Image (spheres, rainbow, N blue to C red):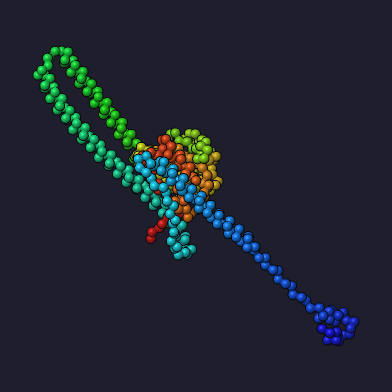
Amino acid sequence: MADDDYKNPWGDKDELGKIVKRALNNPMVPKKAPEEKKEDPKDIVARKAAEKAASIARGEIAAKKAAKAAKMLAAAEGREETVEPIKVVPVVEETKPEKSGDDKDSGKEKSGRDRDRDRDRNRDRGKRDRRDRSRERDRGRRDRSRERDRDRRNRDRDRRDRDRGRRRSRSRSPRHRRDRSRSRERRRRSRSQSSEDEDAEEEEEEDNSMFPSAAMVADRFVEVFGMSKRRIENIMECVGEEMVVTDLVNEETMVSSPKELEALLKENDSHKAEAAKRIFIESNRPTDPNYSLDFYSASKAPFSGKLFQKDCCVVLYKVKKGKIIQAWMGPDTDKIADDASTTEEQAYASKPFLQALDKMIRPGGLGGTKITKIYNNYAKIETWG
């Protein structure tokens, strides 16, 4: 702009006019926007290769865990029959319409009833299985009793025939009479000894077959832990005479006797305990103990004092004749308790389950030729109605 384009009516010495004139002669230059930095193609290729390698590593780790679980289960179950390895099958969850606030509140109210219904189902299933096993044992006893009676009648008939033949040809001296009385006494003793052996065998077969399962005992133990009245008495009713608590990882003894556990309960207050997930394990041999592996969220395990767990943990209960005879406690390193979407295959391939399985298949644990597992995810309980 030329100098004569703007005329100041107040004269050339006016300061405001000078400022206006300088602004018109020097307009403001707009600032350029900062240029975006383009990513180097080499960096893009390296980043994609790293993501692909991480994805492959995660798949290989999951496959190794599943193969390890299959080998341990095959070693435990392959006494008379082979066991196929566990196949990890992806589970596609159905998409359900999102519930409104009222529906969500009603679902939370129903969760307690659903948990009770699940517990009743497990209890009824256990009763049916025990009833069927009892009927099979009764049939076996009746058949064995009939066979023993038939054999005894045959032996008596043969003995009578032999005695008749001996009486005809044998002399009746006192020495022979003494020999006959001694043989009768020996036969009576052998019969009484055989009956005692049969009774002892039947008692051994009936061991641990008509008592509550490990899932029922663990559920009762968790339920009475948060009670206010007769809490310690109800807890000790679930505990055996030689119950101990051991660390699941390093196998150190944490509680050595029921008296120590009772003293620990008296010194510390109770809190609400609740299992997030549970795996019930048993074998097809009725004399074996059965197990319950519970997954607990932070501060939800049924233990207090020095056994109190602030983080997620697992507790393995070993139950025989309806009593907890041993418990193992360890950390939930895979956070199974807090993951509501954990599937049955993922739970069986987790590190806590493999550690617990190592304890269960040791001598004095699971035997037989078949191991049964039942997985319960209390965060995903189906509701009806």
Q: Is residue 163 above or below residue 234?
A: above
Q: Position of residue 290 (x, y in %)?
A: 40, 41
Check the image and report above or below for 212 versus 341: above
Q: How far from the left and from the top, in percent, is residue 98?
A: 47, 64
Q: Give 315 or 152, whichever is nearer the viewer.
A: 152
Left or right: residue 158 versus residue 81 is: left
Q: Can residue 368 be spotted in the picture?
A: yes
Residue at the farthest left position:
168
For the point 51% across and 46% down, the residue is 332
Q: Position of residue 254 (x, y in %)?
A: 52, 36
Q: Is residue 324 above or below residue 272?
A: above
Question: Viewer-proximal residue, 338 or 371?
Answer: 371
Q: Quadrant of residue 280?
A: top left
> In which quadrant is the C terminus drawn?
bottom left
Residue at the image point whose x is 15% and y is 26% from the top: 158
In the depicted view, which residue is nearer to us: 140 or 299?
A: 140
Q: Residue at x 28, y 28 (%)?
A: 196
Assign the N terminus to one quadrant of the image: bottom right
Number of disc labels: 0
Any part of residue 344 in sight: no
- In this view, the residue farthest toward the right is 13
Q: Residue at x 60, y 60 (%)?
A: 45
Q: Position of residue 282 (x, y in %)?
A: 39, 43
Q: Quadrant of residue 212?
A: top left
